[in-house]
Image: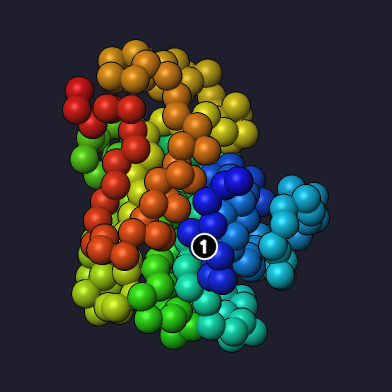
Amino acid sequence: MGSARFKGQRAVLIGASAGIGLETAKRLSAEGAALVLASRNMERLEAATRDIPGVIARKQVDATDEAQVAAFFKSLESFDHLSTFVPAAADAAMSAKFGRFLDMDLALIQRVMTNRFWSHCFAARHGAAKLKPGGSIVFVSSTMPRKAIPGYAASSAAAGALESLARVLAIELAPVRVNVVVPGFIASHGTENIPEERKAQWARLVSAQGVKRLGTSEEIADAILFLMSNAYTTGALLSVDGGYTLT
């Protein structure tokens, strides 16, 4: 029998139709949580999560649209945990266009910030009032603020902003805890579609780190559940990167 550390608790996941969000939903379900799942693609969300026990609601939400996010949280009862994930389809399309900062279109940079920072900000702003005391918010960031990679200026800036926001929210929202998981290079559906040049760049970087492979969505989901469950951890950045930032 598996653990039941989330029995009697309710978790809200935005961006739960694929990747890390979907794996987090599966892990929480297996450990007893009741789930409210949201995604901008309702058809994909229903198909991906129909066999997950404990789902009490599925809702269509565009995380980059503040009005939709506000309406989503207004419709919910109180809950214990909140985690938001980058809208994957839009993010993959933007990542394929990354380049040197001076060559990037300003509109693309703004879209990256909306996708990777403002979507999380909207969720925290409108979801905080529904979180129970002692509950948690877990964001997912990236290693880029600690180790610069040419061509990733916009996403690095977004991740740095998210991490700074989380540390302030850990103080302002207490006793709600706010933490950040910092994944390294993760194998996912999105990584299958990145340009070959970018794949080669990733391969070189991964070959230099301590754990010489891409991480998995399951490994990141495990870290998210740790931060949700550990009542003495707040304002933390938990790196799960195979040692990438050590090299």
Whole-percent x, y for residue 25 in the image: 60, 53
* Residue 148 lies in quadrant: top left
* Residue 175 lies in quadrant: bottom left
Residue at mark 1: 6
**Depicted 244 relative to depicted 224: above or below:** above
Whole-percent x, y for residue 143 in the image: 30, 39
Q: Nearer the viewer, residue 213 or 33?
A: 33
Q: Amino acid at mark 1?
A: Phe
Q: Secondary structure at mark 1?
A: loop
Q: Nearer the viewer, residue 170 or 194?
A: 170
- Residue at the image point whose x is 52% and y is 51% from the top: 3
In the figure, is residue 42 to the left or right of 165?
A: right
Q: Nearer the viewer, residue 184 or 159?
A: 184
In the figure, is residue 56 to the left or right of 118?
A: right
- Residue at the image point whose x is 59% and y is 60% from the top: 32
Q: Quadrant of the C terminus?
A: top left
Q: Is residue 48 visible?
A: yes
Whole-percent x, y for residue 191 in the image: 55, 30
- Residue at the image point whose x is 57% and y is 47% from the top: 2
